[in-house]
Amino acid sequence: MQDYQLTFIELALRREALRFGQFRLKSGRDSPYFFNAGLFSDGEAAALLGRCYAAAIVRSNLGFDMIFGPAYKGIPLATATVVALATHHGRSVPYAYNRKEAKDHGEGGLVVGAALHGRVLIVDDVITAGTAVRESLDLIRHAGAEPVGVALALDREERGQGDLSAVQELERDAGLKCVSIVTLSDLIEALSRPAGGLEPISAAQLAALNAYRARYGAR
């Protein structure tokens, strides 16, 4: 495990963005864990989260020219990430985000921030059905730019209708590289043998995570 991954897991537990129990998902599945990036809702959390995204992106060696945050959750995530890239990695990159509805006055349009150009990296929290990311791909390509990847906080590694996960389908269908701070497998590893101050979860919670992965995990 990388230090930034342990930092992310500890932060997610401390902010209760990552919880364990029984949760009904939009897919209808009953999950033993739930992740809500909206609970990273203060300055410290935003700063640490941005550092984790930036570290994962830099470690991936993915080439990109700018960052895009899909509305709405992707907007603060993209902002935190570009700040961390400049502060901790000496790289200042432009960023943009979209509106849900086009503005019909002022500068107008759907995109706020830097003009979309070159190789664009999308920053989001998780991918379930991939709808928001696919809409972003259309917007980026329509502007004449090239989407090259997606950076995620958590890859649930959970299959959709077929054997592949939504992340794997996106990589296959759109030709993107997906980078995640952590995966479900990383969570299980970190919480099975806690390090860096992490507290172990109960044996029952760990068993539930492993059972869920066995039942719904991507092939």
Image (tube, rainbow, N blue to C red):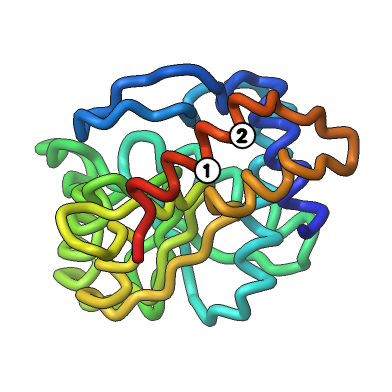
Is 3 situated left or right of 56 in this image?
right
Query: Which residue is depicted at the point 80% across and 44% down?
Result: 193
Query: Which residue is depicted at the point 25% across and 67% down?
Result: 169
Identify the residue position indicated by label 2 in the image.
206
Residue that lies at the very extreme toward the right in this rendered image: 196
Query: Which residue is depicted at the point 69% across and 24% down?
Result: 202
Identify the residue position indicated by label 1 in the image.
210
Q: Position of residue 100 (x, y in %)?
A: 19, 37
Looking at the rendered image, the quarter that the C terminus falls into is bottom left
Report the Cα–Cα distance between label 1 and label 2: 6 Å
For mark 1, give the secondary structure.
helix
Residue 32 versus residue 151 in the image, above or below: above
Q: Position of residue 192 (x, y in %)?
A: 73, 42
Q: Position of residue 201 (x, y in %)?
A: 70, 27
For mark 2, give the secondary structure.
helix
Of the residues shown, which amino acid type is indicated by label 2? Answer: Leu
Q: Which mark is residue 115?
A: none
Looking at the rendered image, the quarter that the N terminus falls into is bottom right
